[in-house]
Amino acid sequence: DAKTTQPPSMDCAEGRAANLPCNHSTISGNEYVYWYRQIHSQGPQYIIHGLKNNETNEMASLIITEDRKSSTLILPHATLRDTAVYYCIVRPRSYQTGANNLFFGTGTRLTVIP
Amino acid sequence: ETGVTQSPTHLIKTRGQQVTLRCSSQSGHNTVSWYQQALGQGPQFIFQYYREEENGRGNFPPRFSGLQFPNYSSELNVNALELDDSALYLCASSLGQGGRAFFGQGTRLTVV
């Protein structure tokens, strides 16, 4: 069952920041927010995850609101290679970054425009 | 390149037939998960194998079955193929059930 809501598509100019929103108003206390992406003709790729604090890694930043009901994935300088479907997933922390029982939904199709 | 390889890359089968898809996990990974991705949809979890035992299953009928071998490679078997089984089948491997998972590029199955 879907626990997240994402816009079906977004565009972003190359070199600009891409901000992808996700609503997860029913998130529970033991659930983390995970982001994956799937580039055309490839399998999904883990990007980042977080509980309540902002997180940053080499790929992206994750901003989670204080009430944890929504989050934003930020790609600071989008490139053409970032064109992909981005999935926001809420799941218990016990799954960590494993691939057990991931619910992908339909995600946001991000198109980076030259 | 994730180190997870799937074979074959493409396959065409007739309704009612059986099919076996293969997944070679990344070196050192002992956990394999399988997903089905219909056109235009996100991947759906089929099941996971950890140390040769199934330890999680999604909402798929028993005609979807699997195996994991001592070298941790895995097979997905689908019996009595239906047209709706046409999809991209993805496998992912990880070290342990919670380790970071890496996906292969999938097998595109077409049932006619």
Image (cartoon, coloured by chain):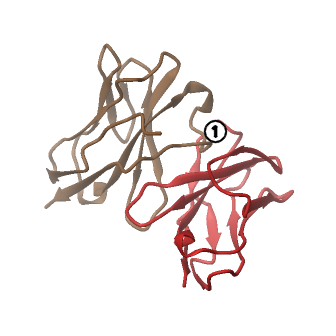
Quarter-wise, where is residue B40 in the image?
bottom left
Q: Disc 1 designates what residue?
A: B99
* Position of residue A15 measured from the top left corner of the image (x, y, whole percent): 16, 49
Give the image location of residue B3, x and y in percent: 61, 60
Residue A6, position in %: x, y?
29, 41
Letter of the chain shown red in the rendering: B
* Amino acid on which the number 1 mark rests in the picture: Gly
- Residue at 38%, 18% in the rendered image: A53
Horizontal side, residue B111 vs residue B17: left or right: left
- Along the viewing direction, whichever of A21 and B59 lies nearer the viewer: B59
Task: Judge from the rendering whether residue B25 lies leftward or rightward of residue B89; answer left or right.
Answer: right
Colour assignment, chain A: brown
Q: Is residue A111 above or below residue A34?
A: below
Assign a secondary structure to mark 1: loop
Q: In which quarter of the image is the C terminus of chain A?
A: bottom left
The residue shown at (70%, 64%) is B24
